[in-house]
Image (spheres, rainbow, N blue to C red):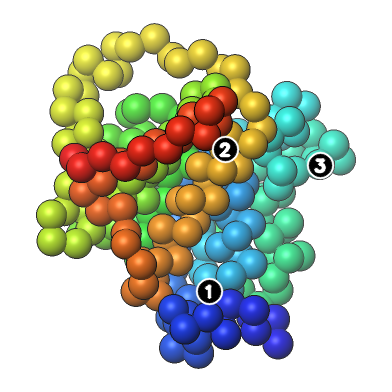
């Protein structure tokens, strides 16, 4: 069977696989982070995956955005990603949204899913995801990268229910900050996105120590990794 290798794990088994099949996960941003998140969730058998991205594939993406190929340059990322994931696993549903997540559409889109995963690259979208997830009582799996460094957390989940605003309380100050440097090696989003995907699987199947109320960080130059309480 397709899922034998994960179903033999006691943390997953048949019950966990059924939970994965029934799960609906929204990925906001299908670029460097969204690529590994989407590939591993599709491979694991998450039954319905939504993909939100208004960008098109460019040549500079291919160094790290492993969902795409040279043949797809200038095509919509959400559509190309949906085709790639469907080719990987035809037994799941992939729903592309070739749009930016906005205050006007976020509520309606997020409402259809159980968990929202962050593959985006700007503060405004993260605050928006955070606030809608609080309003709709849905977990928000957060990840961010810069250069060789990355961080992951799970917001609005568990007893503490910490949010993105607990990590970055001053929204206006964060939005005024200049964009972070664009330099990054391809494996940084690969590592951080894979950790985000792991947190989604843990939430769905109900195993492990989920990063609720905690912030995990890594520096790939030294492999120094830390976990902080928020």
Q: Which residue is pictured at 56% across the width and 17% down the height?
A: 182
Q: Is residue 6 above or below residue 139?
A: below
Disc 3 + disc 1, Cβ < 8 Å: no
Residue at point 44%, 88% (across, down): 15
Is 117 in front, or is 206?
206
Give the position of the N terminus as an image quadrant. Answer: bottom right
State which tag comes first along the sequence, 3 or 1: 1
Asked if one can make out residue 72 in the rendered structure from this viewpoint, the answer is yes
Judging from the image, what secondary structure is the residue with disc 3 in? loop
Q: Nearer the viewer, residue 47 or 146?
A: 146
Q: Quadrant of the C terminus?
A: top left
Numbered disc in front, either 2 or 3: 2
Query: Residue under circle 2?
Result: 189
Residue 176 image-quadrant placement:
top left
The residue positioned 17% from the left and 47% from the top of the image is: 162
**Which residue corresponds to mark 3?**
69
The secondary structure type at the circle numbered 1 is: loop
Task: Report x, y in % for residue 116.
Answer: 38, 54
Which residue shows up at 26% across the image and 46% down it?
A: 214
Marks counted in the figure total 3
Quickly name the residue at label 1. Answer: 47
Q: Would residue 130 be found to the left or right of residue 220 on screen?
A: left
Query: N-terminal of the two: label 2 or label 3?
Result: 3
> How far is disc 3 from disc 1 in space, using C-alphas?
25 Å
In whole angstroms, how far apart are the C-alphas of marks 2 and 1?
A: 24 Å
| Relative height, residue 10 to residue 113 (above, below) | below
Residue 144 vs 12, above or below: the answer is above
> Does any portion of residue 103 appear in the rendered image?
no
Q: Earlier in the sequence, mark 2 or mark 1?
A: 1
Residue 89, image x and y in percent? 69, 70
Mark 2–mark 3 distance (CA, rounded to whole Å): 17 Å
């Amino acid at each position: 069977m397709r899922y034998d290798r994960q179903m033999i794990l006691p943390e997953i088994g048949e019950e966990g696989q059924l939970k994965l099949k029934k799960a609906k996960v929204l990925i906001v941003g299908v670029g460097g982070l969204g690529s590994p998140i989407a590939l591993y969730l599709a491979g694991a058998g998450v039954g319905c995956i939504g993909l939100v991205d208004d960008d098109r594939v460019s040549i500079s993406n291919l160094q790290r955005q492993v969902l795409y190929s040279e043949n797809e340059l200038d095509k919509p990322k959400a559509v190309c990603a949906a085709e790639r994931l469907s080719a990987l696993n035809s037994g799941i549903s992939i729903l592309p949204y070739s749009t930016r997540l906005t205050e006007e559409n976020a509520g309606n889109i997020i409402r259809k899913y159980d968990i929202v995963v962050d593959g985006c690259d700007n503060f405004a979208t993260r605050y928006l995801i955070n606030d809608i997830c609080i309003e709709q009582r849905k977990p928000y799996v957060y990840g961010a990268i810069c250069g060789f460094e990355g961080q992951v957390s799970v917001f609005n989940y568990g007893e503490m229910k910490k949010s993105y605003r607990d990590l970055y309380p001053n929204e206006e100050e964060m939005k005024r900050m200049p964009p972070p440097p664009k330099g990054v090696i391809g494996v940084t989003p690969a590592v951080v996105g894979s950790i985000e995907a792991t947190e989604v699987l843990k939430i769905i199947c109900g195993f492990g120590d989920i990063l609720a109320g905690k912030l995990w960080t890594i520096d790939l130059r030294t492999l120094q990794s830390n976990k902080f309480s928020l």
